[in-house]
Every structure is written in C-alpha cells, then in structure tokens.
Image: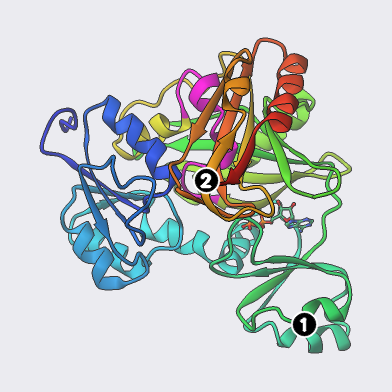
C-alpha cells in the first residue's frame, strides 16, 4: 500500500471553501500534505493547506498546472474544468471522483438523462438548449404549467432553480441550457450519503431529513436519522446505493431524494463531494463524512458510518439586512447548551443568507435534540458591526 502518512505524498483539492476546510482537519489528523486552489485569496482553506494557490477553477491551464503538482486530486465544488481533469488522468494523476463521473453530474440535464437510462427513479423532465424555447413548448402543448425550471449548469444552493406557475415567471430567467421538471408534491426531502472506494467497498450513512421553515421555504434543520419508517429508509438507501454503483463513483456521493405522498423515492440530484446534509457526522457519527471521503479517495478501508447519537445540524447564515464584517452574537449562550458545537467557516464578510457556519446538536433523545436545535436557531445571530 502507498504511504500517505507523514510522507511526500501530496493531495490536491480544487476549491478552498468550508468543505475543503473541514476536509483539511482530517488530512491534518493523518498528517497528509495538501495543496489547495481557490479563486479567492481569503478562502476558508487559505491558512490551513501546506500550499495555497489563488486561481480560476474553470480555467484549463490553471487546473492542469495545479494538478501536475499532486499525486491524487479531488474537489470540493463541482464547477471545475473537467477537460483539464481528463488530461491529468490520461497523464497518470489520480482524480477522484473521476472526470467521467463529474462530467455526468456537472450538467443537470446530463445527470437526469443518466437516471433515465439507468432506471433510477426521478421526476419526469424535458431538456431545453435555451430557456427561450420553453414558451413554444407550452403553447404547442408539449409542456404543462406548473413546473420547476433548473439551469443545467452553475446553479447552487437554490439559485438556478425556479418554480414556474405562470408565463410571467419565465421573465428574467437567464437564456441558458435548462430543464423543465415536473413539480413533486413531496412529503419529505431526504438525503443519503454513500461512500465508495476504488476497490468497490461501499458504505452509507443513515438517511437524513431536511426540515423546512414553514413560510420561508428554507432548510432549517438537517435531522439524523430521518423520522421516517424503516421501509421508506431502506428504499432511500437502496436507491442511493444504486446511483453510486451505476455512476461508478469514488469518494462521497450525497444523494438528495424526495419522498412522495405515496412513499416512493425519487432522486432529485446528487453531489459528488462532502455535503451540507452530512455535517452532523463530525460529532454524531463514528466516522465523519470528511474522514470517509479521504479514506475513499485514497483507497483505504472505509470507516463506520453509523451514528453514536442523534444529530441535528443548523446552518448559520447571514441575517437579512446585514452586510460587512461578521459578528456572531450570543455565542456564550449557545456554548452553554448541552451537546452543542458551533463550526465557524472563517469568512470575514457576512451578507444575507451567506453560509457562514453551522451548529451541530448531539443528543441521545431526538425530541430533546430537536428542542435544543430550535433554541440554537433562536439564540444565535449572524450580523455585522
Ligand atoms: P440546487 O442544486 O440549487 O440545490 P435543487 O435541484 O436541489 O437545486 O433544488 C432546490 C430545491 O428546490 C429543492 O431542495 C426542493 O425544495 C425544490 N425542488 C427542486 N426540484 C423540485 C421538484 N421537481 N418539485 C418540487 N420541488 C423541487
């Protein structure tokens, strides 16, 4: 086996945001050398990598030249230059997840076609080369309102997604490659993180549930395990494992799912990297998602993904009406609560809804965990001075 620990081995990470930063805690634990590249010189990873480079992740030469310096290359964001990854692979650099996998996932239309071709349950959809073609499709009866418009590329955290109820909703959308997806009146949004290493070993985390704010329609809590029946949980896990296997994935794959009114499971989308729905694993699981990703891409045995206790994650996002140097209000009150751990991502500037950190609540009892999570949410304020 290759020696990764306290050696000359170099792991490269494309993207230096909070996901990279949490991954670096694990490489630090194993004493693995890391090279990180991000467009921002103030990226959360900047002070924690052995070598930090500022550069454009979508530029072929930048990604290629960076990749040439490392032994294994991974990414914490999907918007990277796939052609450069392909060339690096052809020249012997190990890239996980592979350029082929990323190529399928990076474009939502390609991703959805993959599900269709591989008999993976997903909501029906139509692909359009340009948003402007949608009008015609509606007027000739090929497409019915309402539907969910999704940009094929470069959307994240809900931008690039819009519910279209009337023709007016189409105004102002970018004229880009997109899909129109049937609305799913789901009961629950669930997620399963699956890990697979190159030897084919696979392990999955328990199914988690996103609990939404009743009015704001924003995810408020990620709850692990999801409060669903064993049957539904098993169905969700089976679908997630199938996606990982069919896509020949290596590393962490977060599979976002809808539980329909009839308790069917549909795949919404996948992310080939550590994911917001797995942050609670840092405190609540035997092996955190970040350590698991590292084990997988280095073809090491995978760790135990089971939970030690119930875990709930609350995102810390910038409060509305505040832009500027960040201040975390009421941190002492928060830290005085039982089983509560804040993670601060190291972004100096806050702005409305920017992800600034998260808080994990760990408790033996789910109802108590949920009650503490609510208190956390009501206590902490991410504002500016
Ligand atoms: P992103 O890539 O920005 O996370 P998603 O495809 O996950 O975008 O969509 C964001 C949110 O929009 C989902 O979490 C879900 O609440 C809602 N949504 C997406 N697709 C559908 C759909 N077909 N029916 C109903 N709601 C949807």
Q: CA distance from mark 1 to mark 2?
A: 35 Å
Do the numbered discs 1 and 2 sit on residues whose CB atoms are within 8 Å?
A: no
Residue 315 is left or right of residue 356, and the answer is: right
Residue 351 at x, y percent in the picture: 58, 55
- Helix or strand or loop: what does disc 1 sit on? loop
Residue 57 is left or right of residue 51, and the answer is: right
Q: Is residue 32 magenta?
A: no
User: For the view shown, which residue lies furthest in the left direction?
Assistant: 8
Say which of 91 and 61 sits in front.
61
Report the image quarter containing ligand 1. Answer: bottom right
- Decide: is 63 above or below 357: below
Q: For residue 263, which numbered disc appears in the image?
A: none
The mark closer to the camera, 1 or 2, is: 2
Mark 2 burial class by Cα count in 10 Å: few <14, some 14-19, many 20+: some
Q: For residue 171, which numbered disc appears in the image?
A: 1
Write the residue at 84% across / 42% down.
187
- Give the magenta-colored segment's residue range: 271-288
Write the residue at 62% across / 83% down.
129
Residue 370 is left or right of residue 242, and the answer is: right
- Decide: is 92 above or below 141: above
- The reply to whether residue 336 is visible in this rendering is yes
Residue bearing mark 2: 326
């Amino acid at each position: 086996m290759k020696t990764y620990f306290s050696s000359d081995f170099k792991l490269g990470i494309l993207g230096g945001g909070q996901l990279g930063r949490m991954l670096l805690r694990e490489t630090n634990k194993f004493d693995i050398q890391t090279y990180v590249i991000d467009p921002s010189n103030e990226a959360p990873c900047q002070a924690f990598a052995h070598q930090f480079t500022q550069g454009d992740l979508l530029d072929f030469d930048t990604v290629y030249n960076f990749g040439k310096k490392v032994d294994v290359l991974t990414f914490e964001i999907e918007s990277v230059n796939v052609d450069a990854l392909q060339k690096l692979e052809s020249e012997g650099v190990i890239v996980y997840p592979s350029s082929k996998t990323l190529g399928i996932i990076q474009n939502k239309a390609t991703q959805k076609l993959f599900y269709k071709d591989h008999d993976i349950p997903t909501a029906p959809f139509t692909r359009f080369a340009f948003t402007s073609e949608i009008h015609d499709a509606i007027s000739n009866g090929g497409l019915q309102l309402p539907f969910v418009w999704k940009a094929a590329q470069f959307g994240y955290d809900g931008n690039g997604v819009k519910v279209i109820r009337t023709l007016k909703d189409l105004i102002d959308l970018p004229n880009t490659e997109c899909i129109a997806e049937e609305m799913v009146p789901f009961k629950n949004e669930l997620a399963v993180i699956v890990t697979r290493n190159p030897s084919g070993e696979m392990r999955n985390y328990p199914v988690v549930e996103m609990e939404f704010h009743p009015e704001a329609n924003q995810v408020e809590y990620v709850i692990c395990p999801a409060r669903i029946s064993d049957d539904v949980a098993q169905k969700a896990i089976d679908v997630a494992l199938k996606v990982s296997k069919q896509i020949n994935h290596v590393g962490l794959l977060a599979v976002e799912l809808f539980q329909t009114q009839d308790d069917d499971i549909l795949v919404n989308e996948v992310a080939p990297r550590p994911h917001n729905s797995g942050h609670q694993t840092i405190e609540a699981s035997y092996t955190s998602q970040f350590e698991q990703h590292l084990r997988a891409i280095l073809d090491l045995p995978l760790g135990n993904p089971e939970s030690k206790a119930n875990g709930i994650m609350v995102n810390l996002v910038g409060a509305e009406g505040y832009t500027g140097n960040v201040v975390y209000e009421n941190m002492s009150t928060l830290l005085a609560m039982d089983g509560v751990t804040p993670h601060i991502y190291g972004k100096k500037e806050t702005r409305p809804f920017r992800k600034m950190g998260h808080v994990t609540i760990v408790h033996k009892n789910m109802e108590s965990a949920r009650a503490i999570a609510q208190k956390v949410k009501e206590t902490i304020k991410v504002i500016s001075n």
